[in-house]
Amino acid sequence: MRVLLSWLRDFAPIEGDPEQVGDQLSDLGLAVEEVSMLGEGLDGIVVARVLGLRPHPDADRIQLVDVDAGDGEALQVCCGAFNMSVGDLVPLAPLGTVMPGGMEIARRKMRGEWSNGMLCASTEIGLGDDDDGIMLLDTEASPGAALTEALDLRSDVLYDLEVNPNRPDAMSVVGVARDLAARQGLPFAIPEPDVPESGDAAAGRVSVEILDPGLCGRFGLRILDGVSVGTSPRWLANRLNALGQRPINSVVDVSNYVMLELGQPNHTYDLARVAGGAFRIRRAADGEVIETLDGVERTLTAADGVIADGDDVAIGIAGIMGGANTEIDDGTTSVALEMAWWDPMTIATSARRLGLRSEASARFERGCDPGVVELAMRRFAELLAPAGATLAPDLVDARGNLPARETIRVRTDRVNAILGTDLGRDRIADVLQSIEFGAEPAGDDLDVDIPSFRPDSSTEIDVIEEVARVHGYSRIERTVPRSTLTGHLTPYQVDRRTVRSTMAGLGLDEVMPVPFLAPGDLEAAGLTSDGITVTNPLVAEESVMRASLRPGILKTLAYNASHRLTGLGIFEVGHVYRQPASEQPLPDEREYLAVALAGHGAGDAVAVWSALADALAARDYSLVAEAVPGLHPSRTARINVAGTPVGHVGEVDPGVLEAYGVAERVAWLEVDLDRLFDLPHGDRPYAGFSRYPSSDIDLAFEVDEGTPADAVGRCIRESAGELLVDLSLFDVYRGEAVGEGRRSLAFALRLQATDRTLTDVEVAELRQRCIEAVQGSLPATLRG
Amino acid sequence: MDLDLDAHLIDAAAAVADASDLDALAAVDAELLGRKSLLATVRSQLGDMEPDQRKETGRRVHEVRTEIERLVADRRVEVAAGARSVVLEAERLDLTEFDRGRRPGHRHVVTQTWERLEDLFVGMGYTVAEGPEIEDEWHNFGALNFPSDHPARDMYDTLYVDYGEPQSTLLRTHTSPVQIRVMEEQEPPIYSIMPGRVFRSDTADATHMPVFHQIEGLVVDRGITFGDLAGTLDAFTTAYFGSEFTSRLRPSYFPFTEPSAEFDIRRPDGSWLELAGCGMVHPQVLSACGLDPEEWSGFAFGFGLDRLALMRHGIDDLRELFRNDHRFLGQF
């Protein structure tokens, strides 16, 4: 909402410099997005008449314009716009003028031709938003006249305010003025329109019938006779221009002016074209068609409201746009002026469905003031009176359902308990009365009546907010509540931090791809295609929610590779979303860790897992070879922790890599963190260690490729028992000495007792036991 | 004899000094002090001497022997040090050759900001709550005092998912549904923050992403006031940005808080920056969560987390956070 300081001052003697007023508006919740000083810096600019237009001999984009700047002589100016014709009046900034932006106009040559000044577009002199070319002046003034006088421009301040959706009253000049006057402690009043009534009373000429009281809370009609469509007075057109409404003609301009000033949208019908002078307010029939003022045929539904005439033909869409069939034109003499209160929900739905959101619909859907109708009607007539329009007696008025307004008890203690203030009952009453809320003492408390222009306010807490707002948020003393709790992270959150810091410690960078995928991304990664889909995606490429972190990470690798960034080690911690196994209110959503090591093999992914298991003290895990779709069929293992699967480690399937355009081998780890953190881990109990000497022995076994090293290790561990304090696989040998399809696994064992030094005999026995156990239970032979 | 011993000592000193390594010195040592040395020979002859001469010669032999032993010991230290310095010199390295190695990984700049904020509020006595990113309509809107079809829902460009009834399930548009879940699951007092990922139907540009992150705070206790909200956000401002930053609250509108406010911070250059929405938890919201608004009151606030990350590092394009270019990731 834009407001002019001069317009605000029509209703209250607003004080203060423009900046202070702006700060007060922001502090009232009417955030100032921009302040513009109008009519400043226009002092040197004069009216000039175009005498001739000539092409520039050496440039296509500029032309030479001869103008009369008041002395009757032709003055040559170079100009980049082509929208003017000979005889037009245009604004000229003569040599030496300092423009509003600070630029000084100097005589200069443009491609060899002198330019003796500058012709101005409306945007260059702060007189409009029209950037299409040089401003063409509609004025009686002669060349040489000062522009400010020719256009009756006065210096003014324009505020562009951000109005919150709960404040329809502030979508009007009077609403803003009321708040500001309250803040400044100044009287506020809307002047009574001074308009005589004459002619035939409206009551016998028009009728209103509200067939759907839920649709229309109030429908008022007055008749204006002797209307002729002309142009608006300069002052009115200037104000509309400043507020971003382009002046059109006298009737439309007054309509807009009243809406901007009082917040009441309105519509005018050519009364002669309304069959029977009857206005019937009803829901549209499904499929009912109306041609609206913009010449478009629109098909309605029962969710829309219409105004129909005596023949039950729709002559307007309720609160949205009038019909072409009753449009005012040059032949119009009598006008029916409608001011209504429409059900906000209906208007919101209609406007959205029809794609017709306007200044009027924006006000109706937030809730207009049903109480301003009489005043606004007379204001309309007053403004149109100079053009000869007369106001017929009688307001023809029908009522539907309006929101009930009840008196609200506002407790003084409650106000102070919510705000942390120490305001007395009377101070609260003063604050409320300053914005026209009724406030009557009721013991220590107040009975508050909400004015009709504040539909947002209907409960005690709403009123408390008003007290805070007008009293001033900045005047409320700041305190910090002392939490009675101990702040902490949950064990899950601590574990997740461990995951991230461990990954970073291993040299991996955390990535954060968007969780949207394109159709087919999951399948291309070897995953099932039943991802949760977005109903209204922005683009098809972002229409599937990820069921795995894999596609996003592979895309990240491909993106980086396209910038010659290869060999990346990256990880992500993020949510994945899946169809649940059984019906539940929300999808199965869980948090995963994924790790990709480009240019590395499965072994390096296993090393990452074992570092993570160590960091989390996940004691009991095993890796079990498993073919998983999307992962390398012979280089992938399932990770079990305490016997429960938590993820997979290995490599990405080369076919998947090809599909994603990743040329490197990619080692892969994915872990379901929700599941992992639920399994036994963390806080490893202290394990004592022996003070006695240890003995080291090595054992190498030849096994086939199908026998996991882990199986051999487990067998050794089991048979050696407690005396085995450390076991490591220190060498894997494949070659002629062991033959095709076989390998030698060399383990180092450290043996130690807690209560004695082991004898050579004990060590030899234990060695023999391990050998027999391995050879007995696995297809393995001791390597000599 | 005296002359012989003096000359011997001079010869011996020269021999010791000539020994250039430990082996040579050991040979010299054996020759000068061993059983076949001159000193040993003289010493073996002492018994044949007159008592006076024996005493004098014995003393002299002892002196010479002691002196040679000292020379050998000193020389041994010298030779050993020399030998060690040769070995060490041979191991000389140009350390600048090695200044290229072990690059640590980097947590994402959003994660770093997230955890920094968590730490700050944990220090103020808050816990950290999380919730699902795919939410139901009730938690995202209904419980937060957005009546169905209320125009206020238009403030949020909601992305819905095909799950359950049409428009029943959505990508949460804010982290506020976690507030509801906390109040449903936990008795007051509540001092919690809710960081998380949120979604809007926004086309990506330098300041918008369809995916971004928020952090909200919720306090519900007895006697919580609007002044507490203002004071808490002011304390946050000082702690996070520094004491040269100040803050203000401006009236605003959110369906789930009343009074509602925008939280602005004032930068040292005097300019204001809108940072967060906040307000007193609406009584309807407390009631929807089974709390009596006459007994409990509370405040809530919410920030854009990504913007704090951008501000801290002077990043000018929100999209960089999600593009995952390695040249970006490694900077923080």
Image (cartoon, coloured by chain):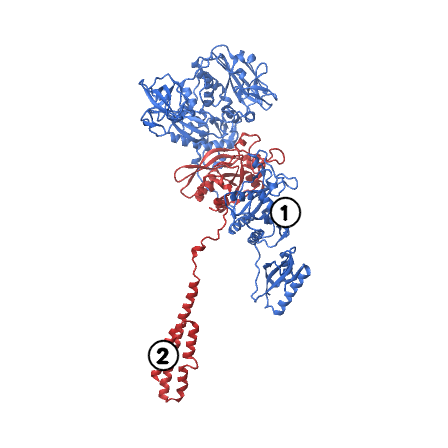
Q: Mark 2 points at which residue?
A: B9
Using the rendered image of the protein, determine whether residue A151 is visible from the camera's viewpoint.
no
Q: What residue type is labelled 1?
A: Val
Q: Position of residue A482 (x, y in %)?
A: 48, 44
Q: Which amino acid does label 2 sit on?
A: Leu
At a point 36% along the width and 84% down the height, the residue shown is: B57
Query: Which of the two residues, A442 or A74, is positioned nearer the viewer here?
Result: A74
Q: Position of residue A725 (x, y in %)?
A: 59, 62
Quadrant of the image containing the C terminus of chain A: bottom right
Rendered hue of chain B is red
In this view, which residue lies farthest toward the top? A200
Residue A778, placed above or below residue A531: below
Residue B126, numbered circle: none
Q: Estimate the spatial distance between the alpha carbons at disc 2 and disc 1, rounded to whole Å.
A: 87 Å
Q: Residues within 10 Å of mark 2 (few under 14, many from 20)?
A: some
Where is residue A109, by image quadrant? Answer: top left
Q: Position of residue A194 (x, y in %)?
A: 43, 16
Residue B229, placed above or below residue A620: above
In this view, which residue lies farthest toward the right? A776
Where is residue A343, by image quadrant? Answer: top right
Tag 2, which secondary structure?
A: helix
Rendered hue of chain A is blue
Q: Residues within 10 Å of mark 1 (few under 14, many from 20)?
A: some
Q: Position of residue A742 (x, y in %)?
A: 64, 57
At a point 65% along the width and 55% down the height, the residue shown is: A706
Q: Name the residue under label 1.
A: A628
Q: Which chain carries label 1?
A: A
Query: Which of the two residues, A221 or B327, is positioned nearer the viewer here?
Result: B327
Using the rendered image of the protein, determine whether residue A691 is visible from the camera's viewpoint.
yes
Tag 1, which secondary structure?
A: loop
